Amino acid sequence: MALILILIFVIYDRIMPSLNVEYVGKVMKLYGRVTGIKGYDRKFGEKTFRLRVEDGPKEIPKFFVKIKENRLFTACGISSRECNEGDKKLDNLIYGRNIRCKGKFEKFDAPVNPGEFDSKTYYANLGIIGNLEADEIIILREGFSVNGYFHKINSSISEKYHKILGSQAAGSLSAMILGDKSNLDEEIKKLYQDNSISHLLAISGLHISLVGGAIYLFLKKLKISFYFPLFFASATLVLYGIFTGFSVSAARAIIMMCIFFFSFIIGKSYDLPSSLSLAAIIIMFFNHKVIYQSGFQLSFLAVIGIFYIMPELMYICNLQNYNQKGIKKVGYFFLSLVFCSLSVNIATLPVILLNFYEISLVGIFLNIIVIPLMSVLVITGLFGGFIALISETVGGFILGASYYILNFYTSLCRVGDTFVFLRLILGKPEKWQVFIYYLLLFILFSSLSLRRRTEQIEKLKNNSKIKFNHFRHILFTFVSLAFSFAILTYRLEEFSINMLDIGQGDCFVIHDGSKNVYISDCGSTTVDEVGKKRLLPFLKSKGWSKVNTIFVSHMDKDHVNGVNDLLNCPEIDVERVVISVSYKSKKLNCEELNKLKKLTKNRNISLLYMKKDDEIKENGVKFRCLYPKGDEVIEDQNEASIVMRMEYKNISVLFTGDIASRTEEEVMKYSDEKELNCDILKVCHHGSKNSSLPEFLRIVDPKMYMISCGLMNRYGHPHKDTLERMVEEGGKILRTDHMGYVEITLNKSKISAKYNSKDLSGKEYLPTKECDCEDCTKLKVNTHFK
């Protein structure tokens, strides 16, 4: 029934058209109850707060409110000096309060590059469809709510954690015990994610089982009555779910645990698959789109792995022979943990790759160590937190155990980080691959289960003729799993040139259709940590863990700061970095160059200087430098740019960095016209009006122009005059500000481009100052030659 419902919901969502929100971009007055608050520091400008609002009007029941710090302080009746306790003071002031607000409603943006986090889909599945950019907000009187009361207790315990344990340990413990990730340290979060134990940072089924089981066993020991421990434990779990925010995994575990207790009350046997299915049906009843959330999928698949896969793996390996007394019992317990971790990973692998694109083999072994300690951590963390509200001394003594366990976890993760080679970047699988993987798993473990049950029945009949060949079944299982894994991770590789949308900057990734990856520039002045947030996820989603060469045309931040970000990511192996020979001169020394030299030295990466006629050839791909010669006197960063020609079979590309018209003349003077003539031109300096001379464009004569620039950037790129010159010469114009990510592929002798135009509906952008034509004024965005 659960599977049929999921299928019905998927079909329904496919058939029904997506909601066309007519109020997007309009000024609206909304109301609702605040159920969350988070502050964001801005590099340039005032700090902004985001309020999560629920119980709103029928058409918009859930939404976010973005409001500047001074406006929120004014609405709360406090000054910035009074708010010296950070976001917690504001949280206590407005959480659970009803508000009225006015502002422009905006929707969430879809991801612009492969591999990026899809906030639009994520929040849509939570029932949140957009943000209200609030100009004003009115806080109404506070009404009593169970959620608000529990939130205050939750917040008080979190404050005690911070006072007793310090910010880093308190942030981790608050996430694990209270479901509050607002103060989770980013370094700790990354350590847990990289080592595949990030599930510990959420309220999971393990937490619920420990809490419910501990309460039930304690009350049972008191021998009060048979029914009271069952009812009390169930009620406590429901209250704990409300207390921690009722995450999907927590809801699933609470429902299953309550069904388990209820089975004792009515005197019926507990059936895990039925319990799991009923939990899914109940959760889908409140919000059916939860089926698309990775938390839902991972939580349910983990239980399926333990119930359906783990017994079969243990049986074919004859593990039951170790379930005896003494040292064999210890070995049985340890091997059971190994098989449990392995089974969960087999069941959840496709979901992990769909969302994170990599797996950590270290995590399989770390989970064997960290999961048994979670029982101590959860009990001492929860019990110590409540005791600390009464006595900080006693509470601090109990929380000491949690503190040392958390430090031990961190140490384990740091050790795991040294085994970078055990982190496998496999890329994002296609849906058909996921389907075939699970189909093969179903066939494999169904046949093993049938064989195991047949043998058990024959043993009950005392039939000694039936013998189970464990070696043969182990070999068969291993080969089947390897084949399934190969299908899931298979990639149809082809030559591609990828122009990433990184805001105002350049980033091009070339893949030769084999295993070689080349990057030409990566930097942005509008996107923070662009190398980690846009380039790294893109590489991982494609399954590319090694970069042969990174070409850095010059050292402006919008071309190199993302390269420096990437060099700080040890999971990506970089063979060499190539820069312009002009940087041998001290006149061009700068901060970004010094960072680049330091990072390449620390990672033992070759740093090469490129000049005219230098070439790099690999697997049919050739990069040939046309400029600079090396004897020029250059003092401007842009004019130091590498100009190079890339060739592969029937396709050629000219990369030009940020050169201006003067340097274009130099390039034309010292280069053969055949060298300059290319199929694709990476347009100089993002389409600046001081570049792309008519004579230069005539000689290059490209079929396609690639322009990387930020939407409505303050420089006016690409300039109207430059675009007009390109149209006069002919050729297709590809630009990231309108199209987002662009992929150019070569199929035999045909060059084709794929892109998805950005959805600019409901947004108001001022036209570039150089453009006042009718179309641009009407749409309020530069739409020339789209």
Image: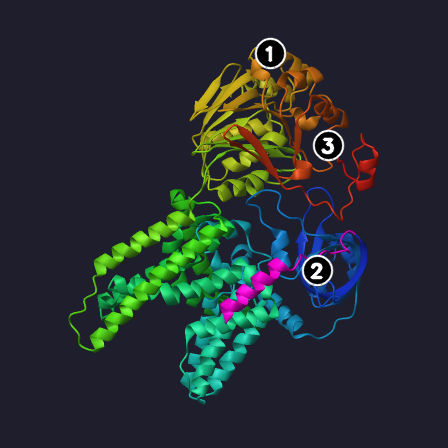
x 81%, y 37%: residue? 775
Q: Nearer the viewer, mark 3 or mark 2?
A: 3
Q: Which residues are magenta?
A: 1-25
Say if mark 1 contacts mark 2, CB within 8 Å.
no
- Residue type pointed to by label 1: Glu
Q: Nearer the viewer, residue 343 or 324?
A: 343
Instruction: Examine the image and state in which quarter residue 637 appears.
Output: top right
Picture disc at residue 63: 2
Counting from the top left corner in percent of width and height, residue 388 is at 55, 69
Helix, strand or loop at mark 2: strand
As drawn, the residue found furthest toward the left would be 464
**Residue holding disc 3:** 785
Counting from the top left corner in percent of width and height, residue 737 is at 68, 37
First-in-chain label (1 vs 2): 2
Q: Nearer the viewer, residue 261 or 329?
A: 261
For residue 144, side relative to residue 515 (left or right): right
Q: Nearer the viewer, mark 1 or mark 2?
A: 2
**Residue holding disc 1:** 632
For residue 774, side relative to residue 632 (left or right): right
First-in-chain label (3 vs 2): 2
Q: Residues within 10 Å of mark 1 (few under 14, many from 20)?
A: few
Q: Is 425 rendered above or below residue 466? A: above
x 55%, y 52%: residue? 185
For residue 348, side relative to residue 473 (left or right): right
Counting from the top left corner in percent of width and height, residue 717 is at 72, 30
Gap between marks 3 and 1 measured at Cα: 37 Å
Helix, strand or loop at mark 3: loop
Task: Specify the color scheme.
Answer: rainbow
Q: Nearer the viewer, residue 731 or 164?
A: 731
Counting from the top left corner in percent of width and height, residue 320 is at 25, 68
- Residue type pointed to by label 2: Phe
